[in-house]
Image: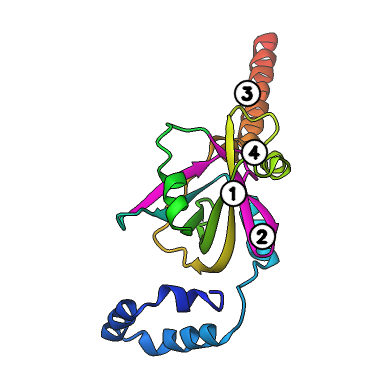
Amino acid sequence: MSKHYPSIAFTDAVRTVQRDHGSEAFYDRKRLAGKAAPGRDPLTVIEQDYLAQRDSFYLASVSESGWPYVQFRGGPTGFLRVLDEHTIGWADFRGNLQYITTGNLAGQDRVAIITVDYVHRRRLKIFGRARVVTTQEDRELVASLTVPDYDAAVERAVVVDVEAFDWNCPQHIAPRYTAAELQQVLAPLRSELASLQAENVRLRNEIRSSE
């Protein structure tokens, strides 16, 4: 848990519930320490490497009506870029043309991001402030976030100034594997199966020739 995560997440209502369940004293020390610390929390090498390996994440924004909106974002591994220790960004691929997240960000820049590594049962939560960057505003930035050879129309870029983050515990994360990850696991088994099949054919041929 980064220093400022508790001061953002642990509101008065949250602290009341923590008090009811006996965890307020433990977390309040972290909250007060975060409030006393200046600046934002930098992403360490651990978080940066983790984010660079992701192929998807969940992005929550807030609408003018106060309703939260959670959107899935996916792409090739590494499409989520770490620009520096305080900033992440990605190319915004064309979707179903609803533009709910884009519209929400026009009125409220606060976002929450959850990235999950299902294979190793890891989960990183991020608080940040997001801004939409069009090609007209910064063509070089949008181009730098575009993924070469990926068949998707890039409409804009989204850049998030990270305020705080927290690693969740692995419990309740069901392991899931992509097709590419399964190929890596299955490749040795398939190679062994092919060798056994070849050996089986050879032995059968030897038996036939000895009859």
Compared to residue 117, the image places residue 180 above or below, namely above
Position of residue 111 measured from the top left corner of the image (x, y, whole percent)? 47, 58
Indicate whether residue 101 is drawn in magenta. no
* Viewer-nearest of discs 3 and 1: 1
Q: Which residue position is annotated with label 4?
A: 135
* Magenta stretch in the rendered image: 68-93
**Reading the chain from its start, which is encountered first: label 2 or label 4?**
2
**Reading the chain from its start, which is encountered first: label 1 or label 2?**
2
Circle 4 crowding by C-alpha within 10 Å: few under 14, some 14–19, many from 20: some
Question: Which quadrant would the C terminus be assigned to in this image?
Answer: top right
Circle 1 crowding by C-alpha within 10 Å: few under 14, some 14–19, many from 20: some
**Reading the chain from its start, which is encountered first: label 1 or label 4?**
1
Q: Which residue position is annotated with label 3?
A: 197
Residues under labels 3 and 2: Cα distance?
44 Å
Instruction: Say what secondary structure mark 3 lies in.
Output: helix
Circle 2 crowding by C-alpha within 10 Å: few under 14, some 14–19, many from 20: some
Q: Residue at x 47, y 83 (%)?
A: 31
Residues under labels 3 and 1: Cα distance?
37 Å
* Viewer-nearest of discs 1 and 4: 4
Q: Which residue position is annotated with label 2?
A: 48
Instruction: Say what secondary structure mark 2 lies in.
Output: helix
Q: Which residue position is annotated with label 1?
A: 54
Residues under labels 1 and 2: Cα distance?
10 Å
